Amino acid sequence: MRLFFILGAVAAGLAVALGAFGAHGLENRVTPERLDTFKTGVLYHMVHALALLAVGWAMAQWPGGAVQWAGYLFLAGIVLFSGSLYLLVLTDTPLFGIITPFGGIAFIAGWMLLAWGVYRGG
């Protein structure tokens, strides 16, 4: 439980910092389309940082493997989805876009496992 609260809090703080960097540090350095891509990474990063906090709370209510794995998948999704978008924008390397869907799949699987774990009661 505690691990996911810590990971969620750190991930949320990092999302805020990256959002500020995107708004103030990238605004005149990348195209508006690339800035939108960066903002998408930040949005999904923050939403899933909050999801990690929810996993920490859910583990206290319904401890079990499915809920825990949901947290790991949310973390993987942040790294793969948001991380690949950040790298795509910062390096202008479209190849990083190949990784993004794997992060999206991790997010979807995380939400399904969270629902399953809560439904099963752990």
Image: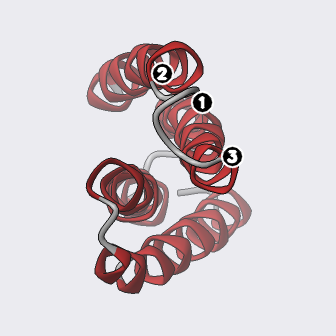
- In the rendered image, the quadrant that contains the N terminus is top left
Label 1: few (<14), some or many (≥20) within 10 Å?
many
Q: Secondary structure at mark 3?
A: helix
**x, y percentage for residue 86?**
38, 49
**x, y percentage for residue 109?**
55, 76
Query: Residue, x 38% and y 21% (percent of image)?
Result: 14
Q: As shown in the figure, which amino acid type bears the numbered disc 1?
A: Leu
**x, y percentage for residue 77?**
43, 61
**In the image, is residue 24 above or below residue 72?**
above
Q: Mark 2 or mark 1: which comes first in sequence?
A: 2
Q: Mark 1 or mark 3: which comes first in sequence?
A: 3
Q: Nearer the viewer, mark 2 or mark 1?
A: 2
Label 2: few (<14), some or many (≥20) within 10 Å?
many
**In the image, is residue 31 above or below residue 56?**
below
What whole-number distance in Å separates the C-alpha atoms at marks 2 and 3?
A: 24 Å
Q: According to the image, label 2 marks what residue?
A: 12
Q: As shown in the figure, which amino acid type bears the numbered disc 3?
A: Pro
Q: Nearer the viewer, mark 1 or mark 3?
A: 3
Q: Mark 2 or mark 3: which comes first in sequence?
A: 2
What whole-number distance in Å separates the C-alpha atoms at marks 1 and 3?
A: 27 Å
Query: Residue, x 55% and y 73% (percent of image)?
Result: 104
Query: Residue, x 44% and y 71% (percent of image)?
Result: 103
Q: According to the image, label 3 marks what residue?
A: 32
Question: Disc 2, disc 1: CB below 8 Å?
Answer: yes
Query: Residue, x 50% and y 43% (percent of image)?
Result: 30
Side (left or right) of 119 relative to 46: right
Q: As shown in the figure, which amino acid type bears the numbered disc 2?
A: Ala
Side (left or right) of 76 relative to 110: left
Q: According to the image, label 1 marks what residue?
A: 50
